[in-house]
Amino acid sequence: MQWRIVGTGSCVPEKVLTNADLEKMVDTSDEWIVTHSGVRERRIAVTETVASMGSQAARQALQEAGIEASALAAVVCSTCTGDMICPPTACQIAAALGASCPAFDVNAACSGFLYALQVGSSFCESGPVLVVAAEKLSRVVDWTDRSSCILFGDGAAAVVLQRGETWSQICLHAQEDARDVLTIPGLNHGGVGEGLSPSYLVMKGPEVFRYATTILPEMVSRAMEGAPVSLEEVRWIVPHQANYRIISSAAKRLGIPVERFALNLERYGNTSSSSIGIMLDELNKKGCLKKGDWVVLVAFGGGLTAASALFQWA
Ligand code: UT7
């Protein structure tokens, strides 16, 4: 089913956690964080929940689209850090908006927004579809682990999809046997009599880095396969905002300047599956997307998963 984006929205928490703040929490420095990742600050949810951030982003997207929540054919939410496992975050968002339609979550870690786009687009025949990504990484980050806590932040994004006429393509991927590279145990009750155990994100950073620098250019190339345009004609590449070094290495491999990639990771860090949508909304609000512009989205993350999409701004 071909689709187009008719509205975008985003929401990040108010609290800013700077690299200087992190220097007081773990043995690190602003200089190390900036040179190794490009991140300068991130947002941390205090009163905000995954569902409240997702709902706010969704309201903006619906408003831009000029669509009432009651007209939605489906709400699909990507999250790996939801406030609750049940009800799904998508159901909480649908309830907050007053939408009465199928609503469910998708989890493909940081690639989840594109997985949710793929699933969401299959409902477009029945009406407009709300695709949300909402994450609160701060709840699973081990704030004593300097090799991971410096990267992540919280936030949400949303898009409204409608049936489209123009060419589009989404490519999804999961690497075999990479289950222990990035883990978040989740349900933290061991079993009968075992009590609770902490459920932190554990990551083999250099392994994710190696995977990302290879898969990111590969997924961009896959998105371009069979396309009616060349990569040179694409206006923006919007990558998962994980690490500036990963993105500049991908740009080199693709033989294109890194300036072709839209980046805001300096301000928000890695917000997992929300990061692409937050960047897309920023481009849209700044008027950097014109009707007819071709856009590539590309993600990678825990799983290990990866995904890409090519579509025309409508
Ligand atoms: O959505 C996907 C999520 N994951 C990612 O995108 C992660 C991808 N990986 C990365 O971004 C990078 O691997 C990191 C930024 C996590 C780490 O950078 P790196 O250049 O791969 O560093 P490293 O893990 O190889 O560590 C190099 C050194 C080590 O010290 P020694 O053993 O050489 O003495 C670390 O202990 O840097 C040390 N180090 C730090 N030093 C200061 C690790 N973290 C820090 C820190 N501050 N925050």
Image: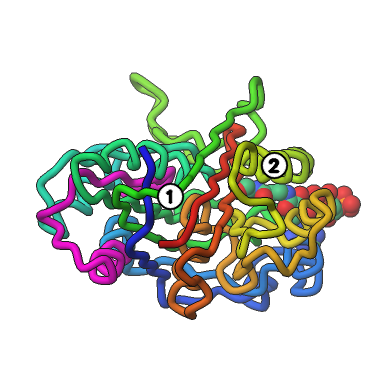
Where residue 106 appears, as percent x and y from the top left, is 38, 38
User: Is residue 69 rendered magenta in the image?
Assistant: yes
Q: Residue at image x 45%, y 76%?
A: 15
Above/below status of 259 relative to 224: below
Q: Is residue 38 left or right of residue 136?
A: right
- The image quarter in which residue 258 lies: bottom right
Q: Residues within 10 Å of mark 2 (few under 14, many from 20)?
A: some
- Is 284 in front, or is 147? 284
Residue under label 2: 221
Of helix, strand and loop, which one carries label 2?
helix
Above/below status of 61 relative to 250: below
- Which residue range is magenta in the image? 56-83
Tag count: 2
For marks 2 and 1, the one nearer the N-term is 1
Of helix, strand and loop, which one carries label 1?
loop
Q: Residues within 10 Å of mark 1 (few under 14, many from 20)?
A: few
**Is the C terminus in the top left, top right, bottom left or bottom right quadrant?**
bottom left
Above/below status of 204 relative to 96: above
Where residue 139 appears, as percent x and y from the top left, is 45, 53
Spatial CA distance of label 2 from label 1 is 19 Å
Q: Which label sits on residue 166?
A: 1
- The image quarter in which residue 121 lies: top left
Where residue 160 appears, as percent x and y from the top left, is 31, 57
Q: Residue at image x 54%, y 52%?
A: 141
- Is 279 in front, or is 28? 279
Q: Is residue 14 visible?
A: yes
Residue kind at label 2, given as amino acid type: Ser
